[in-house]
Amino acid sequence: MYIKHRQSDEYILAKVNLGTFEKFKTLANQINWQPVYSDAYILKNGEYQRYRLNIWQFFVLFFFSYKFQVKMQNNMVWYPFATKKGYLSFSYRSDNGFNQAMRRKQRLAMITASITNLIQPFNRPQLAFEKLSERAQESGFAYFKYVQAHYPKERLYFIIKRDSPDYSKLKTMQHVVIHGSFQHFYLLHRASLFVSSETPGHAYFWRENMGVTANVVRTKPYAFLQHGVLGFKKLDNIFYGDRLTAPSLLITSSLFEQNIVTSQLDYDAKRAPITGLARWDMIDLAQERLNKRDKILVFYTWRPWLDDISDEVFRASQYFQHIKATLTILSDYDDKQVILMMHPKLHATLDQSLLSKVKLWTDNDGPMNELLSSVATVITDYSSISWEAYYREIPVVFDMFDQTRYTDEVGSYIDLDELPFGVKVTQDRDLQVALSEIAERHYQLTSQELADKTKYFAFQDQGASERIHHQIQSLDLSAIKRTKRRALLSAFDRMLHG
């Protein structure tokens, strides 16, 4: 067998007897694994071909891949799994906290929920959540609050980890579910619909992709509330309208955004309703314009090619070095307080002497929604936080230092050389010049940016959750389930006969 990492062209020979699963774990220590995914190949007639599992192997890895997990010395987790096409692949990722005690709860909850679904197939609950089930700050929480306030008899539940900084917001609310509890696993199977600004995997355990529950979660009907307006970052192919994993509703904010979804993601307009984002209901624009704005927020979006790499490799990356240089420039900025909001890996690797000159913002400091109320300028790259700033009438500086690689590996729906708003850092306009331009206009949007707002935000009221609720209530969940069931059977048939 040969192992090939998905971001590499190298095939590495490995010696393992796949007919004996008991010896399978020995493969974990034969290879210098790299995050996150690698695939198995065989050499046949001088060509490398993907290793296809037989039915028995597929069954074992689909249902019991966790039994072959190996906890590595560096706190990473390795395990083999079966792809949806029946090939053998491997995951090498950080520990997501899913332990054996939780697996026992999950098995019992799955059986209980399956029986309940047969006895009581109707009037099933819905489930809301946010990033990694750790937050209550964005559209999922805003929509949950709206339903609790206006439709308290509706069975909408919210998942949160007990050790989350946001848990205190939910302690006195009804229908709050602790992540990892029996009720959590029960509702994953029992719920008729997920409602979130994240993909369904965030309701479960990060990158836990095998087993019955994982596949129920992956294919559950869901309303995708979105982080921000689509534009600078392409969605993963799981969002394509014809995929089994695609949302039943994909919320949009304007005709501009709806056109992206219908023309490039293959949705009809009914599945991409224009409602605005639920979290904007928490923003009073009239009050925002009166707020004291004394901060500069620095936020560079994470790069997928940096997932789970070592600290040493991360420090050598262009991403790290550029952000370090940016903070060095801003550390002497006297006009405004500089706030850094970043991926935890950056927190752990930046020099403390540099961090001492800026304010490092974490979840413990409060939600981004509250922070932006006092921000005068946002410095970012491709993040949807730029749309949030534009909605709040905060000027944006775009620093797209790795635009060529980002375009190749992630992609954008709009021309990154012709941005709809903001000031872009270029060879002729460095960061300091860009900030000076914004300071000269007293940290206000240009008249053209203000005039264009209605093009990108159809609604600037506080009624998004109400409009979203109407769209969710209009869903024909029975028809959606039938369609997904047919797609599942078709996929299984292709696997058997492929």
Image: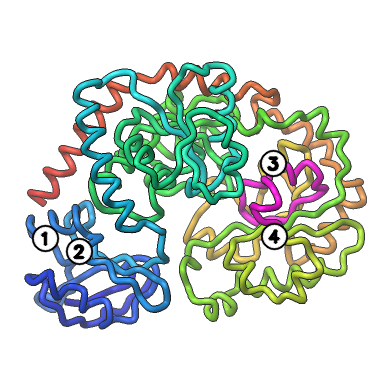
Give the residue drawn at x 61%, y 41%. Answer: 168
**Marks 2/1: CA distance?**
9 Å
Q: Residues within 10 Å of mark 2 (few under 14, many from 20)?
A: many
Residue with the mark numbered 1: 57
Which numbered disc, 1 or 4, marks the residue that appears first in the sequence? 1
Image color mode = rainbow
Which numbered disc, 2 or 1, marks the residue that appears first in the sequence? 1
Which numbered disc, 1 or 3, marks the residue that appears first in the sequence? 1
Which numbered disc, 3 or 4, marks the residue that appears first in the sequence? 3
Give the residue drawn at x 57%, y 36%. Answer: 170
As for residue 368 lying within the magenta part, the answer is: yes
Residue with the mark numbered 2: 88
Are the residues tagged 2 and 3 within 8 Å (C-beta)? Answer: no
User: Where are the magenta residues, as a range?
Assistant: 361-385
Q: Is residue 385 left or right of residue 56?
A: right
Q: Is residue 342 above or below residue 32?
A: above
Type of the residue with mark 4? Asp
**Marks 3/4: CA distance?**
22 Å
Type of the residue with mark 3? Asn
